Image: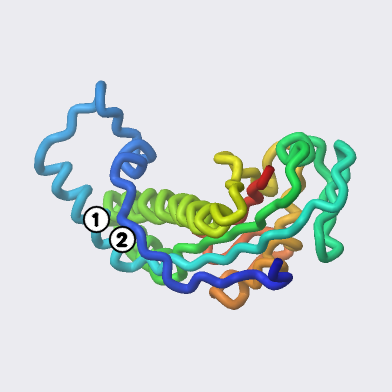
């Protein structure tokens, strides 16, 4: 089992239109959208996708100890969280994963906001958020492809630092383990990832 994160520097996916429209507040059954508004939204979505540079990384680690509060992983990695412990349960391995949409899209959002073009900025933001989340799905599918040879697969859910009692400070460890600096992602003293559309999560392998 590799003890260093695998970097994925060119993740290519289509914008998940349904999820983007949902994030924008459009509901298929109740929201009426003119053809002109839909064309404008789709155009902004395509513009955003052209500026998004999805990259990611993942690291599979064996779970050495899980006592209901303290989780010890291969490589002297430890986390304290009852909720994360319950999520991992009796699983044998964990997968740390991270993804980013890159800096150009964040610059574009700032530029459109400064110009007062809020419609474009909001669609760019929603597209970047959903494509970053979709990149984590892509990474999980990639890992599942490797696990298929072992007759195993990841649980469908994932767990992130900052959720429930899993302290956001744990993101500092995850960021370092995932070598995210190498894909252009830094972390602030408050443990916020930069650029903004960057995420980390933990998956579980029974």
Q: Which mark, residue 84?
A: none
User: Quick one: 111 or 80, which is closer to the camera?
Assistant: 80
Q: Is residue 130 above or below residue 115?
A: above
Viewer-nearest residue: 175 or 1: 1
Classify 10 Å Cα crowding around label 1: few (below 14), some (14-19), many (20 and above). Answer: some
Q: Residue at x 58, y 60 (%)?
A: 98
Do callouts 1 and 2 mark residues in contact (Cβ within 8 Å)? yes
Residue 191 at x, y percent in the picture = 70, 59
Q: Position of residue 39 (x, y in %)?
A: 14, 47
Name the residue tied to disc 1.
Answer: 44
Q: Would residue 25 appear left or right of 150 to someone viewing this image?
A: left
Give the left or right position of residue 84, taking residue 149 as reference: right
Picture quarter with the C terminus? top right
- The residue to which callout 2 is attached is 48
User: Which quadrant of the view contains residue 116?
Assistant: bottom left
132 lies above or below 67: below
x and y, in percent, of residue 14 in the image? 31, 56
Task: Give the quadrant of residue 88.
Answer: top right
């Amino acid at each position: 089992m590799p003890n260093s994160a695998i970097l994925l520097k060119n993740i290519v996916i289509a914008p998940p239109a349904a999820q983007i429209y949902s994030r924008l507040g459009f509901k298929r059954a109740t929201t009426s959208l003119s053809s002109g508004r839909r064309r404008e939204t789709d155009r902004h979505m395509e513009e955003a996708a052209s500026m998004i540079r999805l990259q990611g990384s993942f690291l599979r680690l064996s779970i050495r100890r899980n006592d209901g509060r303290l989780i010890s992983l291969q490589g002297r990695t430890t986390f304290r969280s009852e909720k994360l412990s319950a999520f991992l349960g009796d699983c044998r391995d964990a997968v740390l994963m991270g993804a980013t949409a890159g800096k150009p899209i964040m610059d574009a959002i700032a530029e459109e906001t400064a110009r007062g073009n809020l419609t474009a900025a909001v669609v760019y933001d929603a597209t970047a958020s959903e494509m970053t989340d979709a990149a984590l799905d892509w990474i999980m599918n990639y890992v599942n492809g490797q696990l298929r040879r072992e007759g195993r697969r990841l649980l469908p859910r994932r767990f992130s630092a900052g959720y429930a009692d899993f302290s956001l400070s744990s993101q500092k460890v995850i960021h370092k383990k995932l070598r995210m600096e190498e894909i252009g992602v830094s972390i602030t003293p408050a443990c916020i990832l930069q650029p903004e559309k960057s995420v980390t999560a933990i998956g579980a392998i029974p």
